[in-house]
Amino acid sequence: MNKKGFDTIEKNKFAQRLTSWFDQQQRPLPWREDRDPYKIWVSEIMLQQTRVDTVIPYFRRFITRFPTIESLANADQEEVLKHWEGLGYYSRARNLHAGVREVHAKYGSRVPDQADEISAIKGIGPYTAGAILSIAFGKPEPAVDGNVMRVLSRVLLVEDDIAKQKTRKYFEQVVKAIIPEDDPSAFNQGLMELGATVCTPKSPKCLLCPVRQHCQAFQENRQAELPVKSKSKAPKVETIAVAAVQNENGEWLIRRRPETGLLGGMWEFPAFKVDTALNKKAQLAQKMCEMYELKVELHDRLRNIQHVFSHLKWEMSVYRGTVEGTVQQEGHLFCGSSMLEKYPFPVSHQKIIRMITER
């Protein structure tokens, strides 16, 4: 690993140029309107693995409904998930909800401003802790995300794999050494903003960069080579058959997923993994009969849906049909079309709702 850092003069110039640029060029984002640690917390959780443009309307809607820690702590998880619906990575919402309840109970709804206390809250990792502490409380704590690692990989010509924990730890040490105590908020946000808008993964706008004088990759024309990041594994493929079935009253059978695990607490139409070598429709009918002891008749296949998670890809075949009987299993119910919007559904099953309501 190249461990050439900044000397004192260069460190100060780097920080000054970066913070001055950020003060002038920062985007007007809703979570920057004040330094409320709760709003910063919500925004940082939403921004994990999600684009800023996507997050903005979700953030506004979420804060309108849950403007304070108390309001979110007292909310039902199902309503929280409903307001997160479509944003994905729902464990973020569950962990945020649990963390906020912890702050409400333990700290009287005041986000702690000490690193050891805030880092112990559920769902708050080193990056989120650093972002809240530096932006909301003015603490010189590092907040190292993918944007920051990309910027510093190029500036310092670091060739180690940024997917490795030891590389992240190194960058945290670098930021800790150079972050100015008088304005850590602008410095951390400046690094993030620079990575998001100028020092981008492809075709970085180096001539617009306020710190290109300090960038070793720019000087050696190696920007395109950095950062080094190992490729993630291809997602595992699962073949899923989904039953969009109605009872004699025209109500749809839906079920709630377990609290833990993938899409925990979300609602869905009954869905089962099936063998691609056999008739999917027949397998689905059999599984429905075995699980619910209902008389099931499946008709046409509505369509195929593909949904990709970070580690998993669902190849979904959706079949429409009818059932006779009642369900006894907890977390299952029949629901009229007009009531489906009451429940939080993942994106793939929202597509099914649109299909059946349009028909």
Image (spheres, helix red, strand yellow):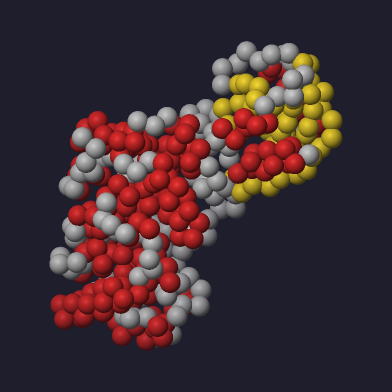
x and y, in percent, of residue 251 in the image: 70, 24
From what the image shows, is residue 224 above or below residue 345? below
Q: 222 or 203: which is nearer to us?
A: 203
Instruction: Please indicate, yes or no, whether residue 87 appears anywhere in the rendered image.
Output: yes
x and y, in percent, of residue 269 in the image: 66, 31
x and y, in percent, of residue 105 in the image: 24, 30
Q: 79 or 153: which is nearer to us?
A: 79
From what the image shows, is residue 177 above or below residue 82? below
Q: 344 or 195: which is nearer to us?
A: 344
Q: Is residue 167 left or right of residue 185?
A: right
x and y, in percent, of residue 194 in the image: 37, 72
Q: Is residue 110 left or right of residue 231?
A: left
Residue drawn 62% across and 21% down? 333
Q: Is residue 355 left or right of residue 201?
A: right
Residue drawn 33% across and 81% down? 210
Quarter of the image containing the C terminus? Answer: top right
Residue drawn 53% across and 42% down? 85
Instruction: Please indicate, yes or no, whether residue 311 appears anywhere in the rendered image.
Output: no
From what the image shows, is residue 19 above or below residue 214? above
Q: 208 or 284: which is nearer to us?
A: 208
From what the image shows, is residue 175 above or below residue 294? below
Which quarter of the figure has residue 138? Answer: bottom left
Callout count: 0
Which quarter of the figure has residue 267? Answer: top right
Quarter of the image containing the N terminus? Answer: bottom left
Residue drawn 67% across and 27% down? 336
